[in-house]
Amino acid sequence: MQAPEKMTDDHSQPLDPRVEMLVNELIGRVADKWTMLLLEALEDNGECRFTRLAQLVPGISQKMLTQTLRQMERDGLVHRTVHPVIPPKVEYRLTELGQGLGEAFCGVWLWAEANLERVETARIAFDTRD
């Protein structure tokens, strides 16, 4: 049996499977804490060098920082500028796409702030039940 086609919000046209694939990829990527933390660091600090980003995102390894920035650049979320000096100077800044994605996920922060106590209470109740 074939799955029914997903419809857009107005139910008039089937959802473009490319949109669904992109949403799934972005949720997976942004759900990755490093992408979220780098979006926040770049939003709060503007254009940053690689070493500065490593300082702003505690716990991220150089390898993970490199991989995450490359993927973000590939997706059009950050712009990488290489300055022709010795030693090389590389800076990263959010693109319009990156800023928009950061704004979209700002709602998660607002939700967390508004519901922090309720989540903590639920966790305590769960952890202490028999």
Image: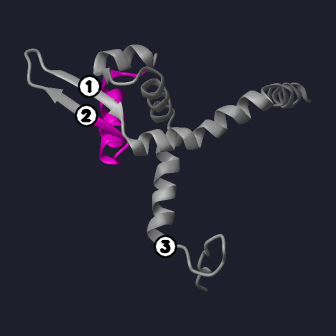
Q: How far apart are marks 3 and 1 (CA)?
A: 35 Å
The image shows residue 60, relative to residue 24, as above or below, that is above
CA neighbours of label 2 inside 10 A, class few (<14), some (14 to 19), many (20+): some
- Judged from this view, the residue extending furthest toward the bottom is 1
The structure's colour scheme is one colour
Across and down, in percent, residue 45 comes to 43, 20
* 123 and 34: which is toward the camera: 34
Q: How far apart are marks 2 and 1 (CA)?
A: 6 Å
Marks 3/1 in contact by CB < 8 Å: the verdict is no
- Pointer 1 residue: 91
The C terminus is located in which quarter? Answer: top right
Res. 56 image quadrant: top left
In the drawing, what numbered circle is on residue 80? 2
Marks 2/1 in contact by CB < 8 Å: the verdict is yes
- Chain part drawn in magenta: 59-80
Identity of the residue drawn at 48% across and 50% down: 26
Q: Which of marks 3 and 1 is nearer the N terminus?
A: 3
Dot 1 falls on a residue whose secondary structure is strand
Q: In this view, does 76 lie to the left or right of 1?
A: left
- Pointer 3 residue: 16
Question: What amino acid is labelled 1 in the image?
Answer: Glu
The image shows residue 22, relative to residue 53, as above or below, that is below
Does 73 lie within the magenta span?
A: yes
Q: In this view, does 94 lie to the left or right of 89?
A: right
Across and down, in percent, residue 42 comes to 42, 27
Question: What amino acid is labelled 3 in the image?
Answer: Asp
Identity of the residue drawn at 34% across and 24% down: 47
Q: Distance between the residues labelled 2 and 3?
A: 30 Å
